[in-house]
Amino acid sequence: MELKAIEEALWFVAQQGWNADGGGFHTAMVRYLGEALAVDYVIVDQLGDEPGTAETVAVYSKGEIVPNFRYSLAGTPCENILDRGLCCFASKVREMFPDDALLVQMNVDSYIGIPLWDSGGKVLGLIAAMDSRSMEDRTGIALKLLQIMATRAAAELERERTRIDLERHYARQLRLEQQIQEARKLESLGRLAGGIAHDFNNILGAMMGFGRFVVEDLPANHPSRKYAERIVSAGQRGKDLVDRILVFARQQETTKTLFCLADLIKDIYPMLEVAIPSSIQIMTKFDPRRVTVEADRFQLGQVLMNLCLNSRDAMEGLPGLIIVVEGVMDARDAALARAAGAINKPHSEHECDDLHVEHECHDLHVEDAGKAGAATTWTEDDGTFRLVVGTYDNTRSYAFLAVQDHGTGIDQSVLSKIFDPFFTTKEIGKGTGLGLSVVHGAIMDHGGLIAVRSKPNCETEFRIVLPIADNAEQQPVSTPTYAPSFARTKPSGKVLLVDDDFDTGEMLSFLLRRSGWDVSHHLDSVTAFMEFQASPDDWSVVVTDQVMPGLRGQDLIAKIREIRMLPCILCTGYDPPISQEEAARLGIIAILSKPLFSDELIVIIEQALCATSPVTT
């Protein structure tokens, strides 16, 4: 009888090798062993990703194949298999392992199992047969049949693991290729934004300059003066919008400065009004204290903008409210406690009524919150989902910048993925999945943390938490003014003005002439240089755009100064920056950002004629 059973087992392994994949083989194998050995249970396990855990690959339970489940190895006979190899308890196994709840629930009296090794000699998992009766009369045949099955079962486990590893590798490769494509797309968009901004700045500069002339020429009580003032004001708002767009398009290293969060919100607010429909109200709440952080202002502005746009999308086109709040964190806040390491212990054992019942086992996987980028998620008693990611030092005080909305909320299954690059729940074409990953990257670079609170169909809050600056009592650097620190003198002399945009050049010509300067405006650098070359001593100062046909502005300045060491001012839009060292080498007295405005340009020209080093605005 024993010989026949062995022959049938060998035939089964050979036959199944031709007509079953890994999953099919394991399922067929546990059924075969259960019937051949007349036992209640047969399982094939593989080791889990977490140490000390295992998950079943196939389960035979009293004549049926039942769903797989995960369990802890501690205190079970399976743990002995991994430590000692072959494990045989022909009877009274429950008495030997009193802490194994599954053995009690299954009413198991006997247990025989052997480990499964991969081709490198590493334990992959195990096969075990269990019965509610003693197996003392079946121990020999059970061991032989399990050993016959073990090699093929291990090979199938290893093959499946290799397949999964390859799929993950190809998935990572695909994601990397997608990221490269998105990066190239964003780079192209950045260049496009720069080109558009350059032209748009010329339009704004001309509009605002001519509008300013109208304001200055009309009497204060003239009915048309207020319209001209509105034109100048609208142009200023357009300039602010272009500046912020260029901030987001610009590729630059992190530069940390001291600033107040309230000031940042006020700076970004005009852009939010443009980007968010009027059906959604934007409310701001400021702390009475001036909460100061040391951070990259441009990056934090981008973070705030992305969070507000995310809230806008959560409204799904319906009227609603977005609230932007700043202040000081309460040291007792739950997010800070979690980030500091006060994490509830996750459940590792599962109560299983019977192997005939489907097992729905949900492990709470908690990573080390002290490590930058690691995330902790939990659910509060009222059903609110929480997530915190980042670092926290309980010896410091923290400020926060929060964006709240009453949109659709975030589902628990999505919460842990929201910061993954290119992850999005939006339809194709309606989102890149980059907004929140940019937020995550920026805050992790700053050594801060992000706390998310959401309740589906109720509300969501994203809270950015950053250390309060150690020297927070210092006031942020204020925006420079252009008031001269010297006695004004009546302008006299001739300005060589070079700008390839006709309206901009004409506006600046009128501006300089109104201030007393004699001006010669050229649309290209070549003809401008020819006029200068004809009479080098006639000129007092050169004002030139940077990007033009023929010679660039800096190249024109270099050629002019080969002939005469003349004060030169360079005007730039969205162009590669020129360093102070390069400007000094070229003899550039000042570098001005377009569009140019009356007070700024006139004062800078007068300052530049007296300056000994470049001035950048």
Image (tube, rainbow, N blue to C red):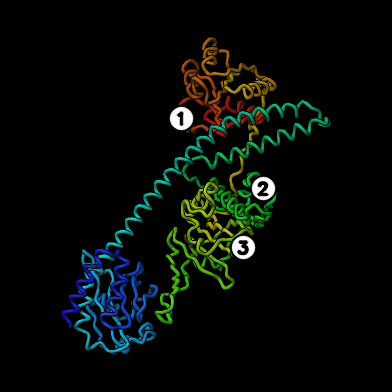
Tag 3 secondary structure? loop
Residue 150 occupies which quadrant of the picture?
bottom left
Judge depth for marks 2 and 1 and give the one in front.
2
**Quarter the N terminus occupies:** bottom left
| Viewer-side residue, 514 vs 197 | 197
Q: Which residue is mark 2?
A: 277
Instruction: Residue 176 in the image: state x and y as whole percent.
Output: 39, 48
Task: State the residue in front, 51 or 586.
Answer: 51
Q: For the view shown, which residue lies furthest in the top direction?
A: 534
Amino acid type assigned to the residue bearing label 1 in the image: Glu
Instruction: Tell me whether circle 2 and circle 1 mark residues in contact (CB < 8 Å).
Output: no
State the residue at coordinates (63%, 63%). 458
Give the x, y percent position of residue 481: 63, 37
Q: Secondary structure at mark 2?
A: loop
Residue that carries the numbered disc 1 in the rendered image? 582
Q: Earlier in the sequence, mark 2 or mark 1?
A: 2
Describe residue 239's horizontal placement relative to residue 84 as left or right.
Answer: right
Residue 549: image tag = none
